Amino acid sequence: MLEFHKATLSDKDWVNKCLTHAGSYNCEYTFGNLFVWSTAYCTEICHYNDFLICRWGRGDDISYSLPIGEGDFSDAVIAIVENAKELGVTPKIYGVTDGYLAMLQEAFTGKFSYEFDDGYNDYIYSVEKMTTLAGKKYHGKRNHINNFNKNNPDWIFELIDSNNIDDCIAFHKKWIESRDADDEDYSFEFEAVLTAFEHYDSLGFIGGLIRVDGEVVAYTMGEPMLNGKCFVTHFEKADGDIQGAYTIINQEFTKRCLSDYEFVNREEDLGIDGLRRAKQSYYPELWLRKCVATYDY
């Protein structure tokens, strides 16, 4: 039987132990991501034998993670199916990458159907290329940075710490106010941001900000992935009225903070046209395909 609960900081060690076995580049598979978005996505976790199993959603809209860890993979998947039956919902496993897809197909031949949605694939970039922005295809990005430098010659970069977290929160509030403040997605994201900042050091987050004339105009933060090769950026906000603000925070943070990593995962585009264009404009090194596996009774 699976027993789920909302993640607390005391869960971090065992969760990370399970995640280490996956060696995954999947943006969902970090403790920080599970923790800060737990309210927005109704995230719960379960320690089943030596596996981590996540469950998201409410009512009829329930999905599960793959069993992440080591042990009897098939047994853990069967436990997921049984838990879904108990709730009266269709068993759905979210975020199935190609390697796990093969495992499910081998262990449960003909029992799952698989649905891909490009909006949930991860964009993974070369840290070196994001740092240098060298070559013809990044010409536009370099122009944005040149314009930013020309118009804001006294800008500075700071690492995020307890001394400037409140400034980042105040900037994020202004960012929301410049849009549709009633949009539920902004509220959920802001709640996740506040949770991330409240537990910033305990979660092992790393972030940076840009100031112009003393005011924050951009910030970003995320956490190392447990494969040791990749960093995942969870949040990034910039003043859209300042040309190059997004580009400069992206490059400066990568250059100053991510030199120990080969890749940076900048998560999904969720099928949002503007977000998709922005992510594609940086030319990902890898595009991590993920699908939903639905159990067929």
Image (cartoon, helix red, strand yellow):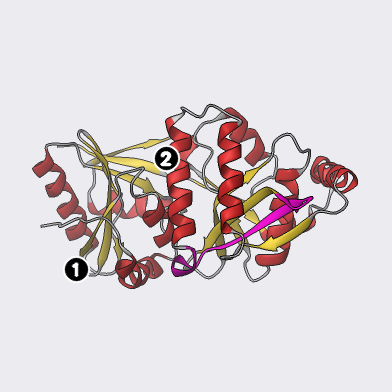
What amino acid is at disc 2?
Phe
159 left or right of 72? Answer: right
Residue drawn 60% across the image and 35% down it: 275
- Report the quarter where the N terminus lies: bottom left
Q: Position of residue 213 (x, y in %)?
A: 79, 50
Question: Residue at the location (29% across, 59% down)?
Answer: 7
Disc 1 to disc 2, C-alpha distance: 32 Å
Query: Disc 2 on helix, strand or loop?
Result: helix
Residue 136: horizontal and vertical position, in percent? 85, 44
Q: Nearer the viewer, residue 79 or 221?
A: 221
**Extreme-right residue of the structure:** 150
Closer to the camera in the image, 175 or 136: 175
The type of residue carrying mark 1 is: Asn
Stretch of the chain drawn in magenta: 200-215
Residue 49 badge: 1
The foreground one among 101 and 30 is 30
Q: Is residue 278 above or below residue 52?
A: above
Left or right: 226 as drawn, with respect to 18: right
Of the residues under marks 1 and 2, which one precedes in the sequence? 1
Residue drawn at the location 34% of the way across and 43% of the way down: 41
Q: Residues within 10 Å of mark 1 (few under 14, many from 20)?
A: few
Give the residue number, with chain letter if any, for mark 2: 188
**Residue 99 seen in this snapshot:** no
Helix, strand or loop at label 1? It is loop
